[in-house]
């Protein structure tokens, strides 16, 4: 069996980190477009208020939300959160939130783009 070459692990970690960063920025764009669409639809000033504090404020908040979702998904997958508990699964879990949003999208295709 071949021994790992020193540095291969670092290169693999860099590849994974790069891929995760790319996906996070893609998700950031999707989330921002969703907030923009909701603000346009609802006429609420929440997005304007966040933008008034500077683009870094909005960007940081959206990135924080995405990273928290990634953390929760990882913890659920690793059994670190009670994802199999019926109450957690129905009301608190990230996967159940995804299922609810998917059902909403199916029921009202124009509501969630």
Image (cartoon, rainbow, N blue to C red):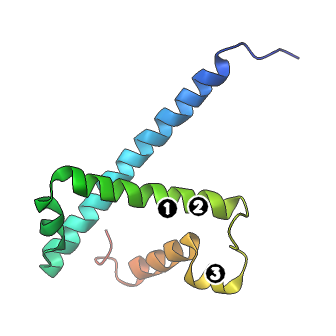
Do tag 1 and tag 2 residues touch (Cβ < 8 Å)?
A: yes
* Residue that appears at 69% across and 85% down: 86
- Give residue 24's position: percent from left, percent from top: 42, 48
- Give residue 78's position: percent from left, percent from top: 71, 58
Left or right of residue 103: residue 83: right
Q: Determine whether 43 is above or below 94 in the image.
A: below
Quadrant of residue 46 within the rendered picture: bottom left
* Residue that appears at 57% across and 71% down: 95
Of 98 and 21, nearer the camera is 21
Residue holding disc 2? 73
Give the CA distance from mark 3 to mark 2: 13 Å
Q: Is mark 2 on a helix, strand or loop?
A: helix
Badge 1 crowding class, 10 Å Cα cut-off, few under 14, some 14 to 19, many 20 or more, is: few
Q: Earlier in the sequence, mark 3 or mark 2?
A: 2
Left or right of residue 23: residue 42: left
Judge whether residue 12 can be spotted in this image: yes
Badge 2 crowding class, 10 Å Cα cut-off, few under 14, some 14 to 19, many 20 or more, is: some
Residue holding disc 1? 69
Quadrant of residue 16 within the rendered picture: top right
Badge 3 crowding class, 10 Å Cα cut-off, few under 14, some 14 to 19, many 20 or more, is: some
Of 46 and 106, nearer the camera is 46
Q: Determine whether 12 is above or below 77 in the image.
A: above
Give the CA distance from mark 1 to mark 3: 15 Å
- Give residue 71's position: percent from left, percent from top: 55, 57
* Residue that appears at 11% across and 61% down: 52
Residue at the extreme right of the image, as rendered: 1
Of 20 and 102, nearer the camera is 20
Residue holding disc 3? 88
């Amino acid at each position: 069996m071949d021994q790992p070459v020193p540095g291969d692990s670092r290169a693999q970690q860099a590849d994974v980190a790069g891929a995760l960063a790319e996906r996070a920025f893609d998700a950031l764009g999707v989330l921002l477009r969703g907030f923009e669409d909701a603000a346009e639809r609802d006429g609420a000033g929440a997005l304007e208020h966040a933008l008034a504090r500077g683009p870094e404020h909005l960007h940081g908040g959206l990135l924080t939300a995405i990273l928290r979702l990634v953390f929760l998904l990882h913890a659920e997958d690793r059994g670190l959160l009670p994802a199999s508990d019926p109450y957690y699964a129905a009301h608190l879990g990230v996967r159940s939130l995804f299922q609810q949003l998917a059902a909403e999208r199916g029921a009202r295709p124009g509501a969630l783009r």
